[in-house]
Amino acid sequence: MKRLVLLVLLTVFLGSPMVHSRQPTPAEMEAISKETRLVFESFLQLWQEERYFEMYDYGKKQSREILSLEEFATRMVELDWVPVGLSPEKPSEISYRYRTLLYMNANIVFRHKSFYDLQFTKPKAFLLQKEEGAWKFDLIQMIRSPYYSPENS
């Protein structure tokens, strides 16, 4: 009897769509793409406006456990470069890992905070992770920008 129950449970579990559908469906990918692009644009806008306290709310739980709000804001203020926007030459792309983990690959135009004529464009890969229903960023990456990017391979 125990073997029969185990066999039935294995059959149900292995036949479950959750086990076989690790990759998002095309409709889910479209919804994830729209959602993450809006979140990314909002986050980038806050960064451009140097609204660091509000950016902190977009941080992953792990990042917020390492960095306090005050430390994050202080470190961001100390950075010499701020994004001006996205490069129009190459559109942003999303690299999916899981339904709740992806990279937003974008070419960001950075400007020096003191010398406005100094600008450069750099490809960046932003790690986004869904936590408690919202897409969150790695704040450690932010305090090291524009030089640091997570491995995207």
Image (spheres, grey):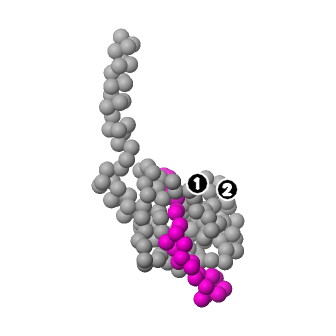
Predominant SS along the magenta part:
strand
- Look at 66% across and 86% down and name the residue there: 114
The boundaries of the magenta stretch are 107-133
Question: Number of labelled discs?
Answer: 2
For label 2, the SS is helix
As rendered, which of 17 and 133 lies closer to the eye? 17
**112 part of magenta stretch:** yes
As helix, strand or loop, the secondary structure at mark 1 comes to helix
Q: Is residue 117 above or below residue 80?
A: below
Residue picked out by circle 1? 61
**Image quarter hosting the N terminus:** top left
Q: Residues within 10 Å of mark 1 (few under 14, many from 20)?
A: some
Q: What x and y, as percent, mark residue 109?
A: 53, 77
Q: Where is residue 98 shown, x and y percent of the image?
A: 43, 49
* Labelled disc at residue 66: 2
Work out whether 97 lies above or below 126: above
Which numbered disc flags the more N-terminal residue, 2 or 1?
Answer: 1
* Outermost residue, left side: 27
- What type is the residue that disc 1 sits on? Lys
* Residue 6 magenta: no
Which residue type does callout 2 highlight? Ile
Question: Residue sitting at 35 percent across and 30 percent down?
Answer: 14
Q: Do we see residue 151 in this rendering? A: yes
